[in-house]
Image: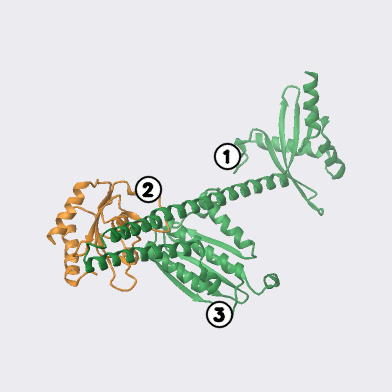
Chain colours: A green, B orange
Amino acid sequence: MLEVSNWIMQNFSHASDAMLIFQDDQLLIMNDLAQNLLDQTDVDTNYLQQLVLTYLKRNSNESDDCFNCAIKNQLSDITIPLTINSDGKEPLSYSLIHRQLSSHENVYSITLKSADARERLDQLSVQHSLIQYINRAHEDERKQISEDLHDSIAQGIFTAIMGISRLVSQQTTASKTDFAQQGDLIQNQLREVLNEVKGMALDLRPSALDDLGLVPALKTLIQRLQENTGIQITFINRLKPDITIPNDIAIVIYRIAQEAMSNAIKHADTDEITLLLLTHDKGVSLEVIDTGKGFDVAKMNQPNGRSLGLLNMNERVKALNGVFTLESKIGEGTSVKVEFPVISAHLEVS
Amino acid sequence: MVDPVQENNYESLVEEIYQMSHYDFVGIALQNSDALGQIKWRYVRGNTSQRYQRIVLRNGLGIAGLVLRTGQPFYDNDLNRKPQDFMYTPITVVEKLTSAAAIPLLSADHQQVTGVLLAGYRHGENVSHETISNLRYYLRRA
């Protein structure tokens, strides 16, 4: 038992949050981190106690017009946001947690959790879900390719092989016209397979993007999407001919166009999409606008498949110093816009 | 590929089937006679949008695609429960059909599939072998 108490004590002293335990006005014990904090900043124990007391007083005041009571009621302990050194060079954000340990002896603890650390954790967790999302998207893409290969290409080739073997077995008996007709049939089948293979290659990575540039690649993508979905896609290209878009940016613009159009096809229930490619003073922008259902942008802040897709787009744009904006209203459609500086020093280096 | 007289027949066939039966959507897709030989929806009734005009059928994908590939009739009652590849939305998705049946249109020598006749419902009505027989009946009379 004594050993266990030792461990608990050890844990307390080296905890990653600053903890202080009081009885009435008297400080009973504090851990190493709390000691450091008191030593290195102008905060003293009195101030912390006062902070808690005023909060308690305010909370017990029933006339308080508390607009965030719903949130407060969910917290079992009192939590107070606190910034130390707010006028100094390095302000530190904490959340102060008051916990009653014994009410009749009036023993309570004050814990200071570093908000910076918590924010980093939040970021880390978003990063984790983003990585998971990307992995899943990769996996889905492979699945799609595998299915296409199997359903479309393999079946097509199989049919052609069957046709040829029939041709071979009938070469002595069949009439010349029958033979020619059968040959035509097989040729047609193989031509279809060829088209499918070309289409799949295009879906994966348009060679036009490397060979001919962004605009022809976008035009090919648009034509394919129109033929596949029947949605009318209007492409307005106002790119100045003398501007050269760095390859990295061209690829991201292409992918954003692809993702935004695919989102519109999946979710917007729209018949029309407009793509706008523009040159500005110091950069280029792409806008993908649909007149579909639209959605509540605020609700997209919880991580789910779709919001992670948007987050992923945003990250890709940010990595190249671009700006990603999303506007949507229920019933009024959605507009995705990306802007990139093109003549900045950073981009000329790469 | 498809002679003009037959094309005329197809137009009135779609009209007739749509008028005489309770299908929510009836359509015929035919191969273009140009070099590309794309297959597109040429005559439709009961459509909810003009999207059908731009769709190019893909061999082996969707009900109509399966009919094209195999030359055999197909039907499906679970259209909206299938996971969808949104990069290709066949007519059943575009027209929000819940069930559909389709039969092949063959060239005069019965050697080549030149098109598809498809009919379907939007509100969960079932299709079956009978639907296929029904479509075949209309096609024979055309």
Q: Amino acid at mark 2?
A: Lys
Within 10 Å of disc 3 (Cα), the crowding (few <14, some 14-19, many 20+) is few
Q: Are marks 2 and 1 on the same chain?
A: no
Residue extending furthest toward the front: A172
Q: Nearer the viewer, mark 2 or mark 1?
A: 2
Gap between marks 3 and 2 measured at Cα: 45 Å
Work out whether B135 lies above or below A42. Answer: below
Task: Give how far across and how far down residue A330 sits, in percent.
Answer: 44, 56
Gap between marks 2 and 1 measured at Cα: 42 Å
Within 10 Å of disc 2 (Cα), the crowding (few <14, some 14-19, many 20+) is few
Q: Are marks 3 and 2 on the same chain?
A: no
- Taking depth in this image into account, of A103 and A190 the one nearest to the observer is A190
Secondary structure, mark 3, is loop
Q: Nearer the viewer, mark 1 or mark 3?
A: 3
Q: Which mark is residue B82?
A: 2
Residue B19 visible, this orientation: no
Which image quarter is the N terminus of chain A in?
top right
Q: Is residue B55 left or right of residue B43?
A: right
Q: Chain of mark 3?
A: A
Q: Which residue is mark 3?
A: A240
Residue A100 visible, this orientation: yes
Taking the spot 55% from the left edge, 48% from the top edge, the residue there is A303
Taking the spot 68% from the left edge, 36% from the top edge, the residue there is A78
- Taking depth in this image into account, of A257 and A68 the one nearest to the observer is A257
Q: Which residue is mark 1?
A: A70
Task: Give how far across and how far down residue B14 sits, in percent.
Answer: 19, 61
